Image (spheres, rainbow, N blue to C red):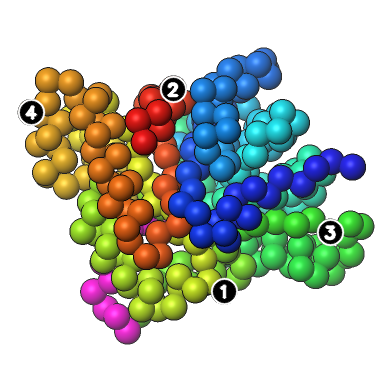
Amino acid sequence: MVKRLNQLENSLNSGRFCFTAELVPPLSTEPDRILEQVDSIKGRVEAINVTDAAAAKTTMSSCAAAALLALNNIEPVLQLTCRDRNRIALCADLIGSAAFGICNLLLLTGDDPANGDQPDAKAVHDINSASLTALVRDMGEKGILPNGRQIDSPPHFYIGSADVPQRFDNKGVPPAIIKKIDAGARFIQTQLCYDIDLIEAYIAALGDWGILDKVKVLIGLGPVASVRSALWMKDNLWGVAIPDSVLQRLQDSTDPKQEGRRICIELIENMQKIDGIAGAHLMAPGQSIPSIAALLSEL
């Protein structure tokens, strides 16, 4: 019997400040490429997200890459998008992934193919991410497919959703993430945010809505190599928050890579003092996993 990997769920529920990281699978058939990429952070994070054709660019299948990690006792967070599969294919990939012991999921809409490496590709979007969350919940809790068919040995999934730290000006309108939480999401990983004031306001608002009683929140962070890369992320990645003070520090530094790590470390230290933040989700757009390892080594 395949061992079920649910260290992330157990660690978050224990109240320990947790780290997850993100891996973009290679466009390669070599399994060693995956294992070499994650070797420097193996055992230093609770789980590693495996992206699903991020930016609508073809890579190794996220299901296959996650299975390779699981087979090597590295806990994955499988990212699945609604962009490329109808509900039949989604259910098949979920059942297959569970057979490898994969429990953690991050369910997403998916980036627009028009902006990817095959712009003529057609998006599927048979269901949206909230509906997919409910589908996954029912597969685990009720042991059924959307059509009511019973699943032999139902899977156990720990469901995650993505969100963007923000200020909620209209306190009478509940955040959109509530729909996914009601559908079964139990943890949140956010977009990159380097603004501690925004993070505090976001977490306070989630607390006011009672959301923090239902989900664990990991704030997106990552090493920044230079002010140029920071400006690129701010201008090209939706929802990324980088205040002018951070840009200025990178601009003035004689060693921007080191300064970028120092900024992250300071943010993590501050986040650890804020009730309601369960951890940090580490990403490094345009860089490599070793840059995340370098950050972890300084914590």
| Residue that numbered label 2 is attached to | 290
| Residue that numbered label 1 is attached to | 182
Which quadrant of the figure has residue 30? top right
> In the rendered structure, which amino acid carries the disc numbered 4?
Asp
Range covered by the magenta-colored residues: 161-172
| Image coordinates for residue 164, horizontal then vertical, percent | 36, 56
Distance from Cα at disc 3 to Cα at disc 1: 21 Å
Query: Are the two marked residues, 2 and 3, in contact with CB atoms closer than 8 angstroms?
Result: no
State which tag comes first along the sequence, 3 or 4: 3
| Mark seen at residue 154 | 3
| Residue that numbered label 4 is attached to | 252
Quadrant of the drawing holding the C terminus: top left
Distance from Cα at disc 2 to Cα at disc 3: 37 Å
| Image coordinates for residue 184, horizontal then vertical, percent | 62, 68
State which tag comes first along the sequence, 3 or 1: 3
Question: In the figure, is residue 4 to the left or right of 40?
Answer: right
Q: Main secondary structure of the magenta part?
A: loop
State which tag comes first along the sequence, 4 or 2: 4
> In the rendered structure, which amino acid carries the disc numbered 1?
Asp
User: Is label 4 in a helix, a strand or a loop?
Assistant: helix
State which tag comes first along the sequence, 2 or 1: 1
Residue in the picture at 69% in, 65% down = 137
Is 164 inside the magenta-drawn segment? Answer: yes
Q: Nearer the viewer, residue 265 or 37?
A: 265
